[in-house]
Image: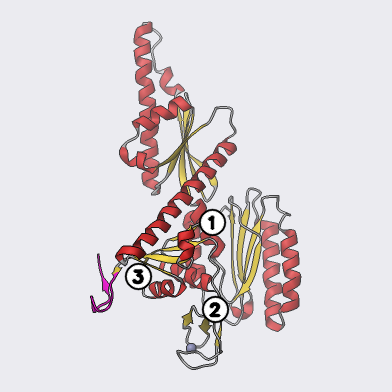
């Protein structure tokens, strides 16, 4: 059954794509933006296909036609009306047929690449920006709990106050009724919090946004237990008459902003780690080494990190970050060196190791140390201080 790709599925797909070995045929990585409707990507697809048909020859051209056919068929039959972004990875028969389509409520850019391995940058960026969170939408007489997963909202629970109100007996005196009403109000707040706590625990959620009637959200906010209060991203006013889609959009822009602040904090941690404690490394070469030695806790990458091409040897698979000057491999001596997309190579290694990647926008500090780096799992000491080279903290 066709459905929007969830965060859990995206995580699995990133690992799968990052582990895909190169073969005789290249991968077509096709990202499409559908914010202006299903036909809005048509021009990108057609113009890119025209250019690629001129460049590719023989088996590569046959594979391209196969890939384009598959993409067109999938778009015609499986695309959902609510999809705003599509990512399709295809390889033709000559390289071992492969097809992995995904669709998201979150937008992706229009971008099509032909490369020996899948280009996963935009998937990693989407995952980092949108991730997932919970919204508690609280009104005087009802509350609902939504999960927003890669930009797509689904209702998880609905709590209605009228059921509680009906149980208040009509024979009671007015003052008795008012006391009871206050008590019922508190009970309703605590009921909401209990359901929220249960859903967040079960789903492994770490972030939530409180939205709704300002008075009610304030009461809920004050009654939150510490663990939930720590997970609260923001409180957003919303009225009964507001469309749910608009409320979800408000929470999304809020969440993305919060996520960006978290990224800035991680970039600052990286700079601090470099400065004082040997708990971080930076620049393309050091990051590649840390990933190769599985020392990485989090890969941190500036959104405008654009390294020069590095090299990869098709014979022994060695990779390096310096721009190649000859086709001779320094490792095995074969003349099989070709240029490497360093940014993709780092993301592939992080994907294979299932390490988190933090994308950071506008960080002068990160750009000044090469635009990329990583927080390390271990303190890496100078060799003369510690012969083993690493120290577990
Ligand atoms: Zn080699």
Write the start and end of the magenta stretch as one range.
380-393
Alpha carbon of mark 3 to alpha carbon of mark 1: how far?
25 Å
| Between discs 1 and 2, the one toward the N terminus | 2
Residue name at image x 36 percent, y 18 percent? 182
> How many neighbours does mark 3 have within 10 angstroms: few (below 14), some (14-19), or many (20 or more)?
some
Per the image, label 1 sits on a secondary structure element best described as helix
Mark 2 / mark 3, whichever is N-terminal? 2
Kindly identify which residue carries mark 1: 126
77 left or right of 280 in image: right
* Quarter of the figure that contains the N terminus: bottom right
In the displayed structure, does residue 387 sit left or right of residue 43? left
Q: Position of residue 224 (x, y in %)?
A: 35, 34
Residue behind mark 3: 295
Could you tell me which secondary element the residue under label 3 belongs to? loop
Q: Is residue 233 above or below residue 214?
A: below
Does residue 12 appear in the picture of this structure? no
Residue picked out by circle 2: 22
Can residue 33 be seen?
yes
Q: Is residue 392 magenta?
A: yes
Prevalent SS, magenta region: loop
| 29 in relation to 59, above or below | above
Q: Nearer the viewer, mark 1 or mark 2?
A: 1
Viewer-proximal residue among 274 and 259: 274
Distance Cα–Cα, label 1 vs label 2? 24 Å
| Magenta span includes 391 | yes
Measure the C-alpha gap from mark 2 to mark 3.
25 Å
């Amino acid at each position: 059954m066709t459905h929007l790709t969830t965060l859990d599925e995206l995580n699995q797909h990133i690992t799968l794509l990052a582990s895909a070995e190169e073969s005789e045929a290249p991968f077509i990585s096709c990202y499409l933006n559908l914010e202006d409707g299903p036909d809005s990507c048509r021009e990108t697809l057609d113009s890119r296909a025209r250019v690629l048909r001129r460049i590719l020859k023989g088996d590569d051209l046959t594979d391209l036609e196969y890939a384009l056919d598959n993409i067109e068929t999938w778009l015609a039959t499986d695309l959902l009306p609510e999809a705003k972004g599509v990512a399709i990875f295809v390889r033709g028969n000559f390289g071992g047929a492969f097809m992995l389509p995904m669709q998201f409520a979150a937008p992706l850019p229009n971008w099509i690449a032909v490369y020996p391995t899948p280009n996963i940058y935009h998937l990693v960026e989407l995952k980092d920006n949108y991730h997932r969170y919970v919204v508690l939408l609280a009104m005087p007489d009802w509350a609902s709990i939504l999960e927003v997963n890669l930009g797509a909202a689904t209702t998880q629970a609905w709590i209605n106050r009228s059921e509680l109100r009906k149980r208040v007996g009509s024979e009671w005196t007015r003052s008795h009724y008012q006391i009871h009403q206050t008590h019922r109000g508190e009970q309703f707040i605590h009921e909401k919090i209990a359901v929220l706590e249960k859903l967040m625990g079960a789903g492994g959620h770490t972030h939530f946004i409180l939205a709704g009637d300002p008075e009610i959200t304030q009461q809920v906010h004050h009654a939150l237990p510490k663990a939930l209060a720590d997970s609260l991203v923001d409180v957003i006013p919303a009225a009964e008459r507001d469309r749910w889609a608009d409320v979800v959009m408000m929470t999304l822009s809020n969440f993305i902003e919060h996520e960006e602040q978290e990224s800035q904090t991680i970039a600052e941690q990286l700079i601090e780690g470099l400065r004082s404690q040997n708990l971080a490394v930076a620049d393309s070469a050091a990051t590649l080494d840390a990933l190769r030695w599985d020392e990485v806790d989090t890969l941190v990458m500036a959104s405008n990190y654009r390294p020069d091409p590095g090299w990869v040897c098709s014979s022994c698979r060695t990779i390096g970050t310096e721009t190649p000057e000859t086709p001779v491999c320094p490792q095995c001596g074969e003349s099989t060196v070709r240029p490497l997309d360093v940014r993709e190579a780092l993301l592939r290694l992080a994907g294979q190791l299932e390490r988190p990647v933090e994308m950071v926008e506008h960080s002068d500090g990160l750009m000044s140390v090469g635009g990329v780096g990583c927080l390390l799992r271990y303190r890496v000491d100078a060799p003369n201080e510690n012969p083993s080279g690493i120290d577990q903290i």
